[in-house]
């Protein structure tokens, strides 16, 4: 039965991921979410049987059925990633007793991770985090935190700290943004840190951010190295294939995806890099 529900969560996640792709492509474009999907090259309406999450992309070999133009790998990537996140949320919660409260917490986590998927892809594509998304993440994370703790337990010190963990974690990001006038870090990243603090709690939020910085540093060095290889006219086809055709040493690297990856790692692994949780923090 648990395996059945895990598969259902994954499939449901891929379906939601398909909708997230629509949202990502249409957000702030004036196109409604209710309109039929069309090929960006030939503008032909896509048939329903070509919209099956993940499967349709590979059955069509990544090309439009009508004009044979290439389709973005964003489609299956977002669908599979969302499916895996939903699958992971189920595994993280299936041992808990069934109740309305636990079901509500799971629903909130699914909404939160769906929002984070949009933020990651949108930030990579446009180098900006829409306010509506980051506030949805923050508010829902705070609600989840309160429901998880329970109102009677809010008077305990470490739970009070968790309630203030959002502003505490976000404050250094905001100061970096303020001092650098946005050159070192974006205001969107500070707002994102607010939600990370509330979602993970203080000690685990610190771990998530540290891991995010580590991953960001490694990826940044790799991308800079690839950009230099590109300048030397080496491996241009490889760079093009992974979407780095226009990447240079001076290109801006979005930081939100690394922060969110750190959050995901901590959420599913429970790793506490600084060991702060051992002190009841």
Image: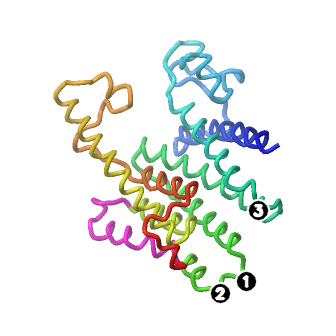
Give how far apart the Cα atoms at labels 3 and 2 are.
21 Å
For label 3, the crowd category at 10 Å Cα-Cα, with few meaning under 14, some 14 to 19 and many 20 or more, is some
For residue 190, side relative to residue 51 (left or right)? left
For residue 156, side relative to residue 161 (left or right)? right
SS at badge 2: helix
Give how far apart the Cα atoms at labels 3 and 1 are.
17 Å
For label 2, the crowd category at 10 Å Cα-Cα, with few meaning under 14, some 14 to 19 and many 20 or more, is few
Decide which of tag 3 and tag 1 comes sooner along the chain: 3
Q: Which residue is mark 1?
A: 152
SS at badge 1: helix
Q: Which residue is mark 3?
A: 102
Decide which of tag 3 and tag 2 comes sooner along the chain: 3
Whole-percent x, y for residue 139 in the image? 61, 66
Q: Residue at x 41, y 56 (%)?
A: 212
The number of callouts visible is 3
Task: Indicate whether 40 appears above or below 67.
Answer: below
Q: Residue at x 54, y 17 (%)?
A: 63
Task: Indicate whether 175 appears above or below 121.
Answer: below
Whole-percent x, y for residue 162 in the image? 56, 76
Whole-percent x, y for residue 81 in the image? 57, 40
Q: Which mark is drawn over residue 155?
A: 2
**The N terminus sits in image quarter:** top right
For label 1, the crowd category at 10 Å Cα-Cα, with few meaning under 14, some 14 to 19 and many 20 or more, is few
Q: Are marks 2 and 1 in contact (CB under 8 Å)?
A: yes
Magenta-tinted stretch: 164-186
Give how far apart the Cα atoms at labels 2 and 1 are.
7 Å
């Amino acid at each position: 039965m648990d395996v059945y529900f895990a598969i259902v969560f994954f499939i449901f996640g891929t379906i939601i991921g398909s909708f997230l792709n629509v949202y990502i492509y249409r957000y702030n474009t004036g196109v409604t979410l209710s309109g039929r999907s069309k090929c960006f090259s030939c503008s032909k309406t896509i048939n329903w049987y070509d919209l099956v999450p993940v499967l349709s992309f590979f059955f069509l070999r990544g090309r439009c059925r009508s004009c044979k133009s290439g389709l973005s790998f964003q489609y299956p990537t977002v669908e599979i990633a969302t499916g895996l996140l939903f699958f992971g949320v189920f595994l993280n919660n299936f041992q808990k007793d069934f109740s309305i409260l636990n079901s509500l917490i799971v629903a909130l986590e699914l909404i939160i991770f769906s929002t984070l998927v949009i933020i990651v892809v949108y930030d990579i594509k446009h180098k900006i985090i829409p306010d509506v998304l980051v506030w949805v993440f923050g508010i829902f994370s705070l609600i989840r935190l309160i429901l998880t703790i329970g109102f009677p337990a809010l008077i305990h010190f470490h739970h009070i700290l968790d309630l203030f963990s959002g502003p505490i974690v976000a404050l250094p990001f905001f100061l970096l943004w303020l001092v650098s006038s946005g050159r070192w870090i974006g205001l969107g990243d500070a707002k994102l840190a607010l939600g990370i603090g509330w979602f993970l709690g203080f000690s685990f939020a610190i771990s998530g951010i540290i891991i995010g910085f580590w991953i960001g540093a490694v990826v940044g060095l790799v991308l800079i190295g690839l950009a230099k290889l590109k300048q030397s006219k080496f491996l241009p086809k490889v760079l093009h294939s992974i979407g780095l055709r226009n990447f240079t040493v001076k290109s801006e690297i979005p930081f939100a995806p690394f922060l969110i990856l750190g959050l995901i790692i901590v959420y599913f692994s429970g790793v506490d890099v600084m060991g702060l949780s051992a002190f009841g923090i």
